[in-house]
Image: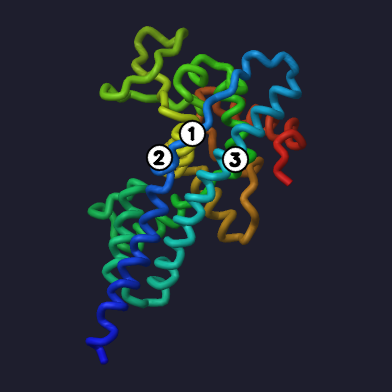
Amino acid sequence: MSKVYKKPVLFIVFFTTLVLFSDFDYHSRITEEPSLPYFDRIDDTKLLKRLFFKFMHPIIELENDLVLKQRKQFLRLYQKWIRGERLLSWEMSLFERFAELYFVNTQKYDIYMIFELLKRRIDIVPIELALAQSANESAWGRSRFATEGNAMFGQWSFSKKNPGMVPKNRDPNAKHMVAKFPSIRASVKSYIKNLNTHSAYLAFRILRSQTREEGVELDGQTLASGLINYSERRKLYVNEIRAIMKINKSLMNLD
């Protein structure tokens, strides 16, 4: 009987693995990327905000959906491991792929810590928080960094291979540049991964994880406090992001 079912079982395992891994690279197969509209030509402030949120909302939502798919896949592995069940070879490959994607050093940590770090890192950013930060960092899509480099979140770059844009008022001794991206979606993707992996946002990830453990819905106002290191303005920046979310809640059309 084993000979009869050997090939179908192998096919099922192969197909399942293919489906799981396809989620990682789905974004690269989408060729129609939305271009940044000419927001600088809109004089009506309320209209500008509404159109900006309408433009950014589906892009952020799409990237969040992909991360959420990864999280569901990871949690299945996590729950199986917690039950003391051995992960199959293809499941271990998926687990190792998650570690690679989310910058968890498998040589540095034991498997327990790797699972815990990934559980904390593979998660979404509340859409209202992402919308508020993109509005703030890109001057509502009108900044030079946004129009010339699709930089919607003011992320810094020190890369020599892919140099970014030099801020006009940068300190003479500073070396940072603002990262530029091939598309708005690439900027959104990088922003989410940045919050999910960079050591500066550990507080954000811990707070988000605690919220999950409490069974409470993720909330941008609450998680904003974890972004104290996003700007040199620290608390003032956090308060500004919270104000944008509060003032523009109706325009974000989240309901």
Which badge, 3 or 1, is on the more N-terminal residue? Answer: 1
SS for callout 1: loop
Query: For the residue carrying disc 1, how many other residues have a C-alpha within 10 Å: few (<14), some (14-19), or many (20+)?
Result: few
Q: Which residue is mark 1?
A: 33
Front disc: 2 or 1: 1
Q: Is residue 68 found left or right of 25 in the rendered image?
A: right
SS for callout 2: helix
> Cβ–Cβ below 8 Å for labels 3 and 1?
no
Q: Which residue is mark 3?
A: 58
Q: Amino acid at mark 1?
A: Glu
- Where residue 169 appears, as percent x and y from the top left, is 47, 8
- Asked whether 139 or 111 is in front, the reply is 139
Quadrant assignment for the N terminus? bottom left
Distance in Å between CA atoms under marks 2 and 1: 30 Å
Q: How is the image coloured?
A: rainbow
Q: Is residue 71 found left or right of 115 in the rendered image?
A: right
Q: Amino acid at mark 2?
A: Ser
Query: For the residue carrying disc 3, how many other residues have a C-alpha within 10 Å: few (<14), some (14-19), or many (20+)?
Result: few
Which badge, 3 or 2, is on the more N-terminal residue? Answer: 3
Distance in Å between CA atoms under marks 3 and 2: 28 Å
Residue sitting at x 39%, y 50% = 24
Residue 178, picture quadrant: top left
- Asked whether 96 or 110 is in front, the reply is 96
SS for callout 3: helix
Residue sitting at x 64%, y 57% = 216
- Where residue 33 appears, as percent x and y from the top left, is 49, 33
* Residue 254 vertical placement versus 71 (above, below): above
Q: Which residue is mark 2?
A: 199
- Where residue 252 appears, as percent x and y from the top left, is 70, 36
- Where residue 246 appears, as percent x and y from the top left, is 73, 34
* Residue 58 vertical placement versus 176 (above, below): below
